[in-house]
């Protein structure tokens, strides 16, 4: 049988996705696959537990460990991971949900009680719920239970991102371990695994969107609060997804008060929807010219991605504009450029294609000095709540990807030219090439002379001495 006759056989997989019959089996297989790979791939296991204060050591993992509470109840968390270094033992309980299943407060608080009784360090939950703010748990529990035991949450999207970053960008030393990690990635990316990405804006998305469009949305509308929470999850997921593609730590940018209290962030989103008919978020990518601002114009049904950057500090206005255009040679002509003059309240705005033909379109009014530029991409917004054709989620993600690939990755900050070394008159005299007669001189040149007359006098003497020497040589030959 030659290569062309080979049927399309499916390769045998370490972690098969076939044969999953129900949600319970789906969760158990996902848990077992993840914990087994954590213990088998050293670099991935360390990256997983390090943020929670675990020591570097051999990681051991177990599934469905049974515990008996003080009141006689028997409970069985989905898994347990433990690492030991010296006398220190670090232990975490793992609780997993897949698909649309959600963690409950009662279940989490029970596991917190177990961890406290057993002297464990933390409880880690994993599900398709995305924490709106890093470090925050999507389920609110009694604060008293967190005094001695920490509670952490990971979305499956975060787990997949960490696996991809470790394998493709940070690296795995052992080839066999790298292959094992690749099998986990393949499994988590399969729809049958139940580890899906962010896929739904919620049941109230259409109603809230229409209320904003009609100008009837109210600040205390509970439906608006739910949609604001979904938008925050989408921005967080968009950063995760882009980081997975770039192999870098892409994060959402929040104000200090918003990061400390998620309710502040949600209130700000709702207020923005009511007052400006928009929703916005900021994403930071390492080593880029600036943060990407994502803004959804709900009334106009458009999505805008933009980035701001400082203009060069020197040169005429046309020179500064050309500096920006040179960086956008391959960018779509439909991208919008804005130039901001010093102390200007408004910008000069024009499409890139038009500015290429006429740079003066971006020169500020009154010929003010250009202080900064903004580059923006606007796309039509999808309307459907879930992923798929004409989906709002997909339109946001694709706009972000296209804007980064077409614009942001080509932009660099302006760097002033290196300072020019200024030479003194004495240094210029000293570095001038000597005359042909001076080259034959046996007298050393004094480099410490700084007076002009001394330089001139010594130069004359240096010329005279060789002439006397030549005359003596001529007389000698004649004799």
Image: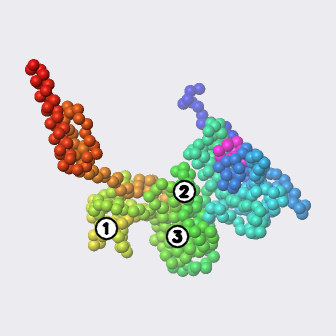
Residue 284 place in picture, x, y as percent: 51, 60
Counting residues from the start of the chain, the first of labels 1 and 3 encountered is 3
Q: Nearer the viewer, residue 173 or 410?
A: 173
What residue is shown with label 3?
A: 279
What residue is shown with label 2?
A: 250
| Separation (CA) of disc 1 from disc 3 | 32 Å
Q: What residue lies at 69% left-to-right and 54% top-to-bottom? A: 53
Could you tell me which quadrant the N terminus lies in?
Answer: top right
| Separation (CA) of disc 3 from disc 2 | 20 Å
What residue is shown with label 1?
A: 369
Q: Does the magenta portion include 327? A: no
Of marks 2 and 1, the one in the foreground: 1
Q: Is residue 3 above or below residue 87?
A: above
Q: Secondary structure at mark 2?
A: loop
**Magenta residues (range):** 35-45
Q: Is residue 136 above or below residue 88?
A: below
Q: Nearer the viewer, residue 443 or 384?
A: 443
Residue 158 place in picture, x, y as percent: 62, 55
- Are circles 2 and 1 on residues that touch, CB within 8 Å? no
- Are circles 3 and 2 on residues that touch, CB within 8 Å? no
- In the figure, is residue 231 to the left or right of 449? right
Counting residues from the start of the chain, the first of labels 3 and 2 encountered is 2
Residue 352 place in picture, x, y as percent: 34, 60
């Amino acid at each position: 049988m030659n290569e062309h006759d080979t049927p399309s056989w499916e390769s045998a997989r370490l972690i098969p996705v076939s044969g999953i019959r129900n949600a319970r089996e789906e969760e158990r297989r996902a848990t077992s696959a993840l914990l087994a790979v954590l213990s088998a791939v050293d670099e991935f296991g360390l990256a997983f537990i390090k943020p929670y204060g675990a020591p570097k050591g051999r990681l051991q993992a177990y599934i469905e460990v049974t515990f008996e509470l003080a009141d006689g109840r028997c409970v069985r968390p989905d898994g347990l991971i433990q690492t030991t270094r010296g006398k220190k033992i670090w232990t975490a309980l793992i609780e997993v949900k897949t698909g649309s299943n959600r963690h409950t407060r009662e279940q989490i608080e029970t596991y917190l009680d177990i961890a406290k009784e057993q002297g464990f360090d933390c409880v880690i939950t994993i599900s398709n719920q995305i924490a709106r703010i890093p470090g925050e748990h999507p389920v609110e529990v009694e604060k008293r239970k967190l005094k001695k035991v920490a509670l952490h949450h990971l979305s499956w999207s975060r787990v997949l991102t960490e696996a991809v970053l470790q394998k493709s960008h940070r690296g795995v030393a052992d080839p066999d371990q790298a292959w094992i990690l690749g099998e986990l990635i393949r499994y988590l990316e399969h729809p049958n695994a139940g580890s899906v990405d962010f896929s739904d804006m919620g049941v109230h998305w259409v109603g809230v969107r229409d209320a904003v469009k009609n100008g009837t949305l109210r600040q205390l509308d509970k439906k608006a609060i739910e949609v604001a929470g979904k938008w925050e999850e989408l921005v967080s997921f968009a950063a995760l997804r882009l980081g997975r593609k770039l192999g870098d730590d892409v994060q959402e940018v929040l104000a200090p008060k918003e990061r400390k209290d998620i309710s502040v962030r949600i209130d700000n989103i709702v207020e923005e929807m009511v007052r400006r008919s928009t929703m916005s978020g900021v994403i930071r990518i390492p080593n880029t010219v600036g943060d990407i601002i994502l803004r959804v114009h709900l009334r106009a049904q458009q999505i805008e991605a933009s980035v701001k950057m400082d203009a060069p500090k020197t040169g005429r206005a046309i020179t500064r504009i050309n500096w920006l255009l040179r960086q956008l040679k391959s960018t779509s002509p439909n991208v919008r450029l804005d130039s901001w003059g010093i102390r200007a309240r408004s910008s000069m705005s024009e499409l890139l294609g038009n500015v290429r033909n006429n740079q003066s379109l971006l020169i500020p009014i009154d010929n003010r000095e250009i202080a900064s530029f903004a580059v923006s991409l606007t796309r039509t917004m999808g309307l459907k709540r879930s992923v798929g054709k004409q989906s709002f989620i997909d339109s946001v993600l694709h706009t972000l990807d296209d804007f980064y690939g077409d614009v942001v990755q080509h932009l660099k900050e302006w760097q002033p030219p290196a300072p020019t070394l200024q030479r003194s008159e004495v240094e210029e005299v000293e570095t001038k090439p000597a005359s042909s007669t001076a080259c034959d001189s046996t007298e050393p040149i004094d480099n410490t002379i700084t007076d002009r007359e001394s330089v001139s006098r010594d130069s004359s003497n240096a010329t005279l001495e060789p002439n006397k020497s030549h005359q003596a040589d001529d007389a000698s030959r004649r004799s």
